[in-house]
Image (cartoon, rainbow, N blue to C red):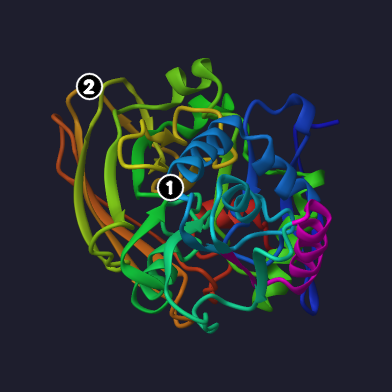
């Protein structure tokens, strides 16, 4: 099979051509960033459960803070993992909040089977719309996205701080930040056009169905974070942090953060790999999705179609803007900046990624990913 070819996927009311790739022969491939949409399935839950770094950090934090406290678990999922962990650790009562009806039904069955139906109450709905009998003393959530706030952690947990949790309540996780590193896309993919493997098509279709139309959805790079050789040939700078979210402090999900990347290697600068750092507890070492194997994977932010030649010492200065979309929960992201090179004028570059925008094929990258007539 060819490494790259054109296929078709279903979208509301139409078919959409898509750039596809052979999974077995592609060193790097694309996957839609699905956590922002109600498209979780068994495979997605299994990927999170198998993430030992993620699971271990959360388990230790829950064991430390849950005993004797009342708890709300936001986004408990079908397995109610952290609601059950909190109850087993000695929480007095846990409210497990889940918006997907099927997942809520399965969670209730799993909780009853485990013998904790008297101490865990499943509450079906959005955490921003439910009420609890009284404010709780601890909040657990796993709504950190491929970008720190992309699943709505900032707005959701700000609301929880105001309405569902006592003023001195503990939040797990403690802090997150979105991270950025300069990327040579051809270096990552060995010059092959990036696409979706056939096994990924259904996730793209489900995101389109959830939004109601095809659009330039956010994509992540599979095969980069856990492969040192791929990182070495594709990462052109060290990381910078933007979008800081302090869950145990003042939480503001909107803002503009300035950052600068200094190139440490020679290559063609095509865009940014955007990841996240997550401190599950205050004194933890952060989980870093740019360089550690994880169920979180780096988002690709395309900036140049063919790549701009850079050398060590060149700089990319940019502003990273986070605003809430019209649903009041999920962020829209925008980036504007300038590439400063020793041998030429500054080059303006920009990128934007909305949660459910109208644009399709708005940039060269997406015209390649969704080839038009």
Q: Which mark is residue 312?
A: 2
Above or below, 193 relative to 324: above
Cβ atoms under marks 2 and 1 closer than 8 Å: no
Residue 50, image quadrant? top right
Say which of marks 2 and 1 sits in front.
1
Q: CA distance from mark 2 to mark 1?
A: 46 Å
Q: Quadrant of the N terminus?
A: top right
Left-right relation of 330 to 261:
right
Q: Is residue 124 magenta?
A: no
Which residue is found at the position 61% from the left and 47% from the top?
Answer: 85
126, 165: nearer the viewer? 165
Above or below, 275 relative to 359: above
Query: Which x, y percent locates residue 45?
Result: 72, 49
Above or below, 172 relative to 231: below
Neighbor class of circle 1 (other Cα within 10 Å; few <14, some 14-19, many 20+) is many
Query: Which x, y percent locates residue 246?
Result: 29, 55
SS at mark 1 in the image: helix
66, 149: nearer the viewer? 66
Query: Which residue is tagged 1?
Result: 65
Query: Which x, y percent locates residue 232?
Result: 43, 18
Q: Is residue 106 magenta?
A: yes
- Could you tell me if residue 126 is visible in this image? yes
- State the extent of the magenta-drawn residues as a range: 94-115
- Could you tell me if residue 347 is visible in this image? no
Q: Earlier in the sequence, mark 2 or mark 1?
A: 1
Left-right relation of 242 to 81:
left
């Amino acid at each position: 099979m060819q490494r790259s070819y054109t296929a078709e996927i279903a979208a509301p009311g139409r078919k959409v051509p898509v750039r596809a790739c052979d999974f077995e022969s592609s060193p790097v491939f694309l996957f839609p960033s699905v956590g922002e949409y109600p498209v979780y399935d068994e495979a997605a839950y299994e990927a999170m459960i198998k993430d030992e770094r993620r699971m271990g950090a959360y388990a230790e934090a829950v064991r430390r803070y849950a005993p004797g406290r009342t708890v709300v678990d936001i986004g408990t999922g079908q397995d109610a993992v952290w609601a059950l962990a909190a109850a087993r650790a000695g929480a007095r009562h846990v409210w497990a909040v889940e918006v997907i009806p099927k997942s809520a039904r399965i969670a209730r069955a799993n909780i009853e089977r485990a013998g904790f139906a008297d101490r865990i109450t499943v509450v079906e709905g959005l955490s921003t719309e439910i009420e609890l009998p009284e404010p709780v003393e601890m909040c657990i959530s796993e709504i950190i996205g491929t970008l720190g706030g992309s699943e709505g952690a900032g707005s959701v947990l700000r609301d929880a701080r105001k309405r569902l949790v006592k003023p001195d309540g503990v939040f797990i996780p403690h802090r997150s930040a979105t991270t950025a590193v300069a990327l040579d896309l051809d270096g990552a993919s060995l010059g092959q056009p990036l696409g979706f493997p056939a096994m990924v098509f259904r996730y793209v279709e489900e995101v389109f169905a959830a939004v109601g139309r095809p659009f330039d959805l956010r994509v992540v790079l599979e095969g980069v974070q856990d492969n040192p050789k791929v990182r070495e040939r594709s990462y052109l700078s060290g990381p910078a942090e933007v979008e800081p979210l302090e869950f145990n402090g003042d939480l503001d999900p909107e803002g503009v953060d300035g950052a600068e990347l200094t190139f440490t290697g020679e290559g063609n600068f095509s865009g940014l790999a955007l990841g996240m750092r997550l401190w599950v507890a205050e004194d933890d070492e952060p989980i870093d999705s740019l360089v550690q194997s994880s169920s979180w994977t780096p988002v690709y932010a395309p900036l140049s179609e063919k790549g701009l030649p850079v050398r060590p010492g060149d700089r990319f200065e940019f502003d990273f803007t986070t605003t809430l979309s019209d649903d009041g929960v999920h962020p829209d992201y925008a980036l504007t900046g300038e590439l400063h090179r020793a041998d030429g004028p500054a080059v303006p570059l920009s990128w934007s990624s909305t949660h459910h925008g109208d644009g399709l094929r708005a940039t060269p990258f997406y015209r390649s990913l969704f080839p038009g007539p």
